Image (cartoon, coloured by chain):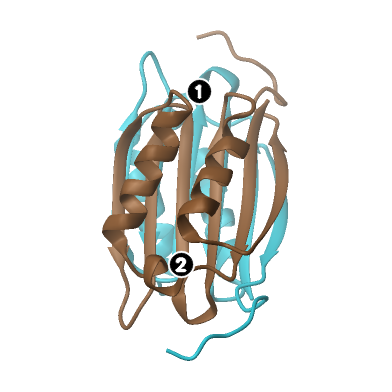
Chain colours: A brown, B cyan
Amino acid sequence: MAEQLLADYYGCDVQRLDDAKLLTQAAHEAVHAVGAQVVEECVHRFEPMGVSYIAVISTSHISIHTWPEYGYAAVDIFSCTQGIPQEVAQALGRTLGADTIRTKMIRRDVKGGTAIEI
Amino acid sequence: MAEQLLADYYGCDVQRLDDAKLLTQAAHEAVHAVGAQVVEECVHRFEPMGVSYIAVISTSHISIHTWPEYGYAAVDIFSCTQGIPQEVAQALGRTLGADTIRTKMIRRDVKGGTAIEI
């Protein structure tokens, strides 16, 4: 079973939400703090504002999409290791200066089908 | 309001699940078919098997994680444009040869906080 945490951050620091370099660094720090590694990453800044950061990490992925105009960020942390998503989400919330974080945990049933011998 | 579709694919073609090039091409075709574009992408093949593909697209992101050993793929399609996630999910299901697709739609309340004048 994999865990996927969907976290909505409200009331964030507007400047931070539009800073691709800061978001990349924050993702690295949060991922490393839980003993995972960033394997591949993409970051894109939209015009006139907003950043999307997505990374394959050693335990699955993290995505951050920001809407500075609403002080909002949508974060997903998908992990095969229990407990990691919550820790990463809390660390990112501190960096973003969020005043409210709403989370939803989804279980992905990786083994829900029929296992195949290969 | 943004839409996020979480789709679990079971009973997929094992060879296709482990083919990073095919998954990348399938993502491109599915994204282009709905009038969106891939802006940035990362793909990583894990050892001994499994692929993670994630991309920033013009309307947010798509991620595909595969577990060939279980015939399973976890797909997320996050979009600011309504209707796009379902179309992309169906196209990917055909490519993966899934016999069962379970989906869950999540609404992300982008404007749920206080809008900020900037």
User: Which amino acid is tagged 2?
Assistant: Thr
Q: Secondary structure at mark 1?
A: helix
Q: Chain letter for mark 1, please.
A: B
Instruction: Point out the frontmost of discs 1 and 2.
Output: 2
Q: Amino acid at mark 1?
A: Pro
Q: Which mark is residue B68?
A: 1
Image quadrant in which the N terminus of chain A is located? top right
Q: Quadrant of residue A2?
A: top right
Considering every residue shown, the one lying at the far bottom of the view is B117
Instruction: Tell which subunit mark 2 falls on.
Output: A
Secondary element under disc 2, as helix, strand or loop, is: strand
At a point 50% along the width and 23% down the height, the residue shown is: B68
Give the crowd class for mark 1: few <14, some 14-19, many >=20 residues within 10 Å: many
Q: Which mark is residue B37?
A: none
Residue B90 coordinates in the image, percent (x, y): 59, 55
Q: Position of residue A85 (x, y in %)?
A: 59, 37
> What distance separates the C-alpha of mark 1 from that of mark 2?
33 Å
Q: Residue at x 32, y 83 (%)?
A: A48
Residue B73, visible in the rendered structure:
no
**Left or right position of A81 against A69:** right
Q: How many marks?
A: 2
Report which residue position mark 2 lands on. Answer: A66
Closer to the camera in the image, A62 or B42: A62
Q: Position of residue A35 (x, y in %)?
A: 44, 23
Image height check: is B8 above or below B6?
above
